[in-house]
Image (cartoon, rainbow, N blue to C red):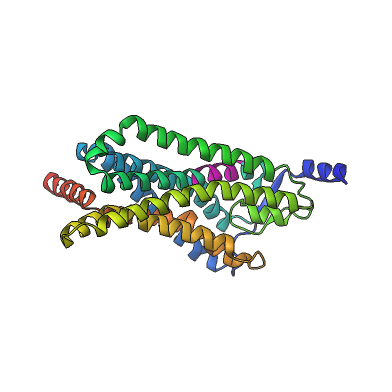
Amino acid sequence: MGDRGTSNHSEVTDFILVGFRVRPELHILLFLLFLLVYAMIVLGNVGMMTIIMTDPRLNTPMYFFLGNLSFIDLFYSSVIAPKAMINFWSESKSISFAGCLIQFFLFALFIVTEGFLLAAMAYDRFIAICNPLLYSVQMSTRLCIQLVVGSYFCGCISSVLQTSMTFTLPFCASRAIDHFYCDTRPLQRISCSDLFIYRMVSFSLSGIIIMPTIIVIIISYLYIVSTVLKIRSSEGRKKAFSTCSSHLGVVSVLYGAVFFMYLTPDRFPELSKVASLCYTLVTPMLNPLIYSLRNKDVKEVLKKLLEKRNTIF
């Protein structure tokens, strides 16, 4: 049985990304929608990174993390969107075995890294609000770099483990992946091996990844809320809450979409695809908007850049 699985696995040279099961005439509409969203992702995140790197006033730990968040959002959406848009026009909708593996690896790397980075940002807000006098000492440049590098390291380790586990499965049921990118659950469906141990290991790994980040975020915000409620003036409370409302919004959108995706029963693949859209494209599009619309510093920099542009022209 093992030989047969290995033989069938070795014969797989490419897969077919089924995508969305809609009428062909709707492919143009979906292509234009994906193109619009992806264009907004590129403009929003590149714009955010440019603003943070060019304005000295934004040379703080919070914006250092935010710049890395924009970088991650830009690249993990770029792993998904271009191939999905090409497949709207392609008849074969094929992706090579190596291409599928690379897409899976990069997406897993960036999405896990984002989770750890959001936990680091929650810790940053905790220090800023609960220990403001020690903020510049505790959130040193060295610590910020270590937190970001650590986030990428955790993402890389997780991605290597998930990718190696998934792509050593024997794929002998079908070449057709019922999704618009290479993801864990659709790949499991086309495997002909017993997935019990794989699912247990995968579930344990997901718990090891997700639980620490959620715990850090929850504990940080419990302390933040407790500290803010002790502030006597309503203006002070409002100012304190406004410094972390953007981050809380980003966390809610990402984790809400991920939980919805993985809590959706596997027998509803079309619903899973819609849920996947939320964290592969919608979240990277919304993040720059959330931070630019709800952040006073970013709005001021944008306003000055626009005024300078109008003066030149």
> Which residue is found at the position 42% from the left and 44% from the top?
117
Question: Magenta residues?
Answer: 102-111
Residue 169: image location, x then y, percent: 74, 46
Question: Front-most of 173 and 138?
Answer: 138
- Dividing the picture into quadrants, the one containing residue 121 is top left
Is residue 110 shown in magenta?
Answer: yes
Vertical position of residue 79 compared to residue 142: above or below: below
Q: Is residue 53 visible?
A: yes
Left/right placement of residue 17 relative to residue 72 reads: right
Is residue 155 shown in magenta?
Answer: no
Vertical position of residue 150 compared to residue 265: above or below: above
Residue 39: image location, x then y, percent: 39, 53
> Which residue is found at the position 31% from the left and 53% from the top?
224
Left/right placement of residue 306 relative to residue 111 reads: left
Q: Residue furthest top?
A: 142
Secondary structure mainly formed by the magenta segment: helix
Q: Residue furthest left?
A: 311
Q: How many marks?
A: 0
Vertical position of residue 265 compared to residue 10: above or below: below
Question: Front-most of 261 and 47?
Answer: 261
- Dividing the picture into quadrants, the one containing residue 5 is top right
Q: Is residue 94 visible?
A: no
Residue 99: image location, x then y, percent: 62, 42
Residue 120: image location, x then y, percent: 39, 43
Question: Front-most of 164 and 224?
Answer: 224
Question: Front-most of 231 and 239?
Answer: 231
Left/right placement of residue 197 relative to residue 270 reads: right
